[in-house]
Amino acid sequence: MSGTSVDGIDAVACRVLGRGSRMRATVLQHVHAAYPSTLRRALLDAMSPATTTTETICDLNRQVGDAFAAAARRVMKRAGISARDTAVIGSHGQTLCHRPDAGSTLQIGCPAVIAQSTGCRVVADFRSADVAVGGQGAPLVPWTDWVLLRDTRRTRAVQNIGGIANVTCLPAKGGVDDVTAFDTGPGNMVMDELVRSFSRGGRRFDANGRLAARGRVCDAVLADWLSLPFFRRRPPKSCGREEFGRAFVAEALRRHARRRLRPEDWLATALALTIESIARAYETWLPKRERETRRDSKRFGLPPIDEVILCGGGSRNATLRRMLASRLGGVPIRRIEEFGFAAGAKEPVSFALLACARLDDVPANLPQVTGASRRVLLGSLTEP
Ligand SMILES: Nc1ncnc2c1ncn2[C@@H]1O[C@H](COP(=O)(O)OP(=O)(O)O)[C@@H](O)[C@H]1O
Ligand SMILES: [Mg+2]
């Protein structure tokens, strides 16, 4: 798996027992293989029409395939498993472009290269089938969140904070049709881009939110950002670099230049955007509890959940965790590590399970989540 942060590949080797909604996964090894900086820059350039060519994209498909294959071989070696022990590799690939409203999405990382290089069969291109039947093709992890993290007593919000932030709400005792999930907006993406820009490419992210913690939130910029139509849109909805990438940050820096904000103020404001968009999304779009009226939940500002489970790279940011806890006012925040997965391991485990679901003929998109017209099998199979 590599997400919209384009930071690198998270690969897991995991043992999967059971089928469909009864699957259980144990992580044997987890590897994070950072992209070499030249490949990372090439991928980011390839996401803007002005800075790419068809040839470049064609070659990157191969290079990303090689990088994914190397990560897979590394994690297999560390776990001490061979191709013969391996039922399947699930490869999300790297999203270059995601335009579900135009009916298209593109993840690169040639699966034939991964299959030939590892000797394993590969399931890849998970998003296309859902998009083909009218869905957003995202998020796809809600089904696996439900498989792995549902609870009989507590209503849980599984909040992933990658480049983009997405939530899966798992009501207590809820079935698969009760799951709500959508992208809440930017996770680390706006903060990462600001840091990149202020450090002239020298730094990739604000470690632990240290810079953001020193800054002051600019209410005018925050209000401007929060007025974007995306935040008002009713789910199903998904977003990516198209909404919150380089262009979004460049435009904000230009538009608000006269405010003379310091870098730390920009970071504080971008972090506030992540926190505020998550909290408002909970208040607006998560299902209300039966005993709560709309007015009650407004009055107390209570999201209708018993606990939040944080995952993704942003869950390693202590300032972010502190601010989210304070904004959600008393809802317990737990980290995914408590459930046996490293922060960066849960998403790749999800794609391992989605690959298993594909082999078991279990459709794994959730139409109420993606907006697809029906449940479909996700992913294409490539044999070595
Ligand atoms: N210690 C940390 N402090 C702050 N941010 C972090 C830390 N570790 C990781 N991150 C953030 O997490 C991002 C990567 O998260 P990840 O879950 O891999 O996202 P994606 O799925 O978009 O690739 C980094 O770009 C960075 O912004
Ligand atoms: Mg990542």
Image: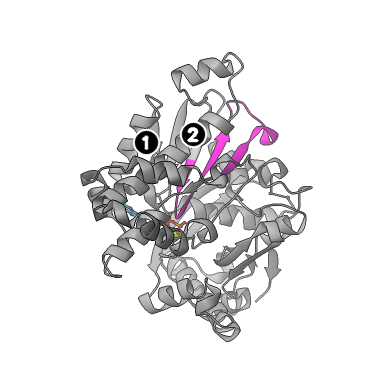
Q: Residue 280: which disc?
A: 2
Ligand 2 shown in quarter: bottom left
Residue drawn at 70 percent across, 40 percent down: 368
Give whichever of discs 2 and 1 has the lower sequence position: 2
Q: Residues within 10 Å of mark 1 (few under 14, many from 20)?
A: many
Amino acid, disc 1: Leu
Q: Position of residue 221 (x, y in %)?
A: 38, 46
Instruction: Tell me the residue that label 1 is attached to.
Output: 324
Asked where in the image residue 195 lies, by quadrant, the reply is: bottom left
Is residue 165 inside the magenta stretch? Answer: yes
Residue placed farthest to the front in the image?
A: 258
Q: Secondary structure at mark 1?
A: helix
Asked where in the image residue 100 lies, by quadrant, the reply is: bottom right
Residue in front for this viewpoint, 249 or 355: 249
The span from disc 2 to disc 1 (Cα, nearest Å) is 12 Å
Q: Which residues are magenta?
A: 159-183
Q: Position of residue 323 (x, y in %)?
A: 32, 36
Asked where in the image residue 122 lies, by quadrant, the reply is: bottom right
Q: Secondary structure at mark 2?
A: helix
Q: Residue 157: which disc?
A: none
Is residue 260 inside the magenta stretch? Answer: no
Q: Is residue 78 above or below residue 139?
A: below
